[in-house]
Image: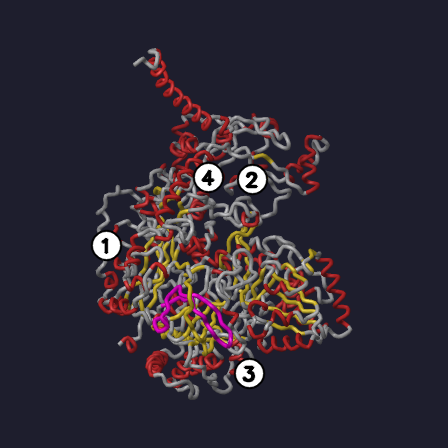
Amino acid sequence: MPQIFHYSANYWAKASIAGVVFLLGFVGWAGYEIDRGHYETRKDEAREQPIPFSHAHHVGALGIDCRYCHTSVEDSSFAGIPPTKTCINCHSQIWNTSPTLEPVRASYRTGESIQWTRVHDLPDFVYFNHSIHVNKGVGCESCHGRVDKMPLMWKANTLEMSWCLDCHRNAQRALRPLDQITTMGYVPNGDQEEIGRQLMVQYHTPSVRVLTSCSTCHR
Amino acid sequence: MSELRKKLDLAAARERLEATRGKEYWRSLDELASTPEFQDLLEREFPRQAVGWAPDENAGEGRRNFLKLMGASLALGGLAACTRQPTELITPYIQQPEDLIPGRPLFYATQTTLSGVSTGILAESHEGRPTKIEGNPEHPGSLGACDPFSQASVLQLYDPDRARALTFNGEVATWAGFYSNLRGLLADQQTRQGAGIRILTETINSPSTADLLNTIKTQFPQSKWHQWEPAGAHSARAASTQAFGSAVATHYNFLNANVVMSLDSDFLGSGPGWLRYAREFSAKRRVVGDQKAMNRLYVAEANPTATGSKADHRFPMRASDVEAFAFALASELGVGGAGGGSNPEFSRWATAVARDLQTNKGASIIIAGEQQPPSVHALAHAINAALGNVGKTVFYTDPVESNPVDQLASFNELLSDLDSGSIELLLIIGGNPVFNAPVEWNIAQRLRKAKLRMHLSMFEDETSEVCQWRLPETHALESWGDGRAYDGTVTLQQPLIEPLYGGRAANEILAMFTDVPLRGSMDIVKGYWAGQHKGTDFESFWRRSVHDGVLANSALPVKTVSAKGGAQPSPAVDSGKFEVIFRPDPAIYDGRFANNGWLQEFPRPVTKYTWDNAAIISPVSAKKLDIDTGDMVKLSYGGRSLNAPVWVQPGHADNCVTLHLGYGRTKAGHTGTGVGFNPYGLRQSKALWHDGGLDIQKISGSYILAALQVQHQLDTRRGVIQGGTLAEYIKNPDSIHEGFENPPHNLTLYGDWDYSKGYAWGMTIDVNACTGCGACIVACQAENNIAVVGKDQVYRGRLMQWLRVDSYYTGSVENPHIDNQPVPCQQCEDAPCELVCPVQATSHSAEGLNDMVYNRCVGTRYCSNNCPYKVRRFNFYLYSDYETPSLKLLNNPDVSVRSRGVMEKCTYCVQRINHAKIDAEKQNRGVRDGEIQTACQATCPTEAIIFGNINDPKSRVSQLKADKRNYSLLADLNTRPRTTYLGPLRNPNPELEA
């Protein structure tokens, strides 16, 4: 009986085994990269907004405090997006004819809200609360990054669960004194780990067991 | 579940009961008969018919199909997780309202009104949308508790079937068009003093609305105002008018009552002031710590109610026999003349009760049911007076309703006016007379004799169908109003949201008849009270009153009344045949809540069926007629007949049938149309509540009733209820737990967690206090975004309610004692569910909560399979409504809406725990005891449910857990549940016990 396959088929057979392993590995790697990468999480992606509002200008250049606009950050789960009235407070006086700001004036005139694109969007099954973080020594910068240097808003962090847990497991790495909460570019006055540990005692930070219980964030 | 079992063998059940020594608890007649089918239910997680899609599907085939589809959907379901998060928008305010902090709810005091009695509520508002109702602690009729109807009123607000458009003869019209049409007619009527105007309302208890109606009467002296309330207090009103010469409202103080005799009154589960009565009554039964005394309750009734389940002695009797019993009791006490029959059983009961009452003069209450004839009310008044209870436990005031007329007579007058053709303009405000008026009146035809008919209604219902003008009405959460509570306290109603569909309030429509026709509901209500206000600064008085929800000190003054003449016996009923008893449905009332899914799916107290009504009958009568639960019967009465399914209820009186009203709606909406059987089709004006002469005939066919009583079975032999009598308990507190295993804590293979630091959440449920009213179930449903699944799914054991109330019977089939046991997730410290989850979707929190993480759950259902308490609920389908726009507004934003394929269960309202913890931590303090109230606890009228931190020895929950009555459910499994129960106690009269 003649041979059906040329003996070079042996080579291809062996190569295909390696090929399959490689292919599976590649698909796995690519899947992981897509899932955890910037495409999926939209980290560092500046999002377009109806008005090109610049935090760099308002926070960085003018030095307006975060809480002037995000009024409920200390009291509520939601930091608050300023009502049109807050914009108009200043922009009825300055830049009040700027065409860029026409949507703001239109909103105030017509009573139609400005629809902002949400940049920091947690899944619906996550219940993050701003107030407990800013009242217990987690600075705005810790999650939102150097907002004072962002002309358009982007996510400085992935907001993935593993990123949340990094702090919930090691709160000492993130805590800062309460008077530094809104500071951008905060530099700890000494060793962060040591200061953080002191602050954890001072702020009655719950144990890691409590901070990593499922129902702390999910319900 | 009739086809589940063979014919019920009553003899076998009795035999088994007699064979058992001492106390044995059972939940259904199947269990009692110990049928193999019951054993199967006990061991299974779901009833057998839960497998498959269609009721007639072969079980094996269904399972295979199910697995195939599950496999496919799993594979596809995984892909769905790989999408990029969709872009969401944030829509801020233009000018943010004062006091509003986005993300934090606000609470507003307002009211709900049912059958002419208002109850104070607090409505929770999230950025302007009401999501949840709580009781108003400042309101005398609520004291913080809330009834199922009020709880479910938010669903009614967002009901997609609500009337959305103003129509004239089916054509969409405008309010301006309506107004000009109306004013034109009124100008014409003015010349004839309004002789052609008739207004038909429900019972009005609103002072400002009554004032408007009186104004209309002055302006149009010939016009008439009629009231019709199908489940109203017709008898009580008639009785007080007969007995005292004028209508009088009666209310009670159960805190001062040691002995209570209920003559067919469900004062712990319905009627005016029941929330307060339940609170007071249960306070007298809380045998904890130093309190060693308990009140005693006797109940004479036909169908077991929430009140009957709390009775120390329950006398099952036909509704018509209550009168004979009342006469027997009266004559034992030397009041009232002769009357009633000479039933030896009645006199034995009456003698014992009378002696008990006589030793508690001035500290007892005789309370007559709203549905009992005037004679029974008159006897109750006379006995209360003779015992010196008046002024101590029983109080009389002017009526709560604004115009206490004989509604039947008034309606009859309207009917003759209709027949004479003299009515040119008939305005029907709310109500649904076409559906619920006595059948022989033939209302649908006769209403058409009015020239122009207008119906103001939240829904396009049976009555709207016969009216040309259909006016959309506002919901109570959309308009201003007022009303009087059970004791007359003026309760204010304020809107939380703009009318969703451009509706108008009743008072706005009535104002259109007056000289100042275009007034908003706020101007009407506020204007009225400004006129009534005596002091100077009205504005601040008004603001305070609106804030509190009540007008301070506005309860009607207690008055002294004297009875005129004794009670007249009612005419004897046809005793040869069966007796028919009509009662408002515990869930959908007179039919007005028929389109409310929460209430339809609310398991009725005691019977536990959902989505239906049935002909409720006693086991003995069923045996006599050879019928069983689920059989169809033809009920013939007064020349009319009704086909209905049978429900055999232990404890029901013999030779009578109870029918709950409100079902069989023909135009209710998507949820309520065509559900159940319509007893209004038998109900006549001569006997609104009960009458003899009913024939029952078994007909072919059977009917599936989706009842919970046979689902989620626990093995009652293992101490599910650990109770006893008060006397035994006082003598030896451990006696109630005797014979039940309670293994030592360390006898476990689970690792030992240290819960001694921080908070450790726990709950106690006092079975002795629980009346089984079910308010907690609806509260839980509202708080936790729990989906409605429909009758078919309930029948398959897929009900989603996190909290169930089981009823346990003990004693004979004819007259068992009933205990109610609410069962939420037990939050076991050593939770069997957690070990078997392959993805750790359920795991323990540091504070002892058995957390359920929906986003991790892949739906293996192992946890539910391994839960000994059967409290886990699985989303077999996409039960949550993600589509209907109005229902999106209903959801609690603090709780995830669960999708298909996800397990869920009670979380101890972890959202409330987290909010309270965050608020406390921000203030650098611990959570105070009582600061966290779970939704079920907050609404409970009897304070049966107590939640708190068990690491704090001073907390209420810790103290209750230290009580001798405390026990764990299925303690022998050593799951160490954080929820424990306080055993029920009975306080029987030794004279009757012998």
- In the image, residue B201 above or below residue B366: above
Kindly identify the amino acid type of the residue bearing the numbered disc 4.
Answer: Val
Q: State which tag comes first along the sequence, 1 or 3.
A: 3
Residue at image mark 4: A126
Q: Are marks 3 and 2 in contact (CB under 8 Å)?
A: no
* Label 4: which secondary element: loop
Label placed on residue A80: 2
User: Dot 3, how many residues are within 10 Å of its Cα: few (below 14), some (14-19), or many (20+)?
Assistant: some
The residue closer to the viewer here, B257 or B583, is B583
Q: Chain of mark 4?
A: A
Q: CA distance from mark 1 to mark 2?
A: 52 Å
Residue at image mark 3: B245
Q: Chain of mark 2?
A: A
Kindly identify the amino acid type of the residue bearing the numbered disc 2.
Answer: Gly
- In the image, residue B836 above or below residue B982: above
| Residue B533, visible in the rendered structure | no
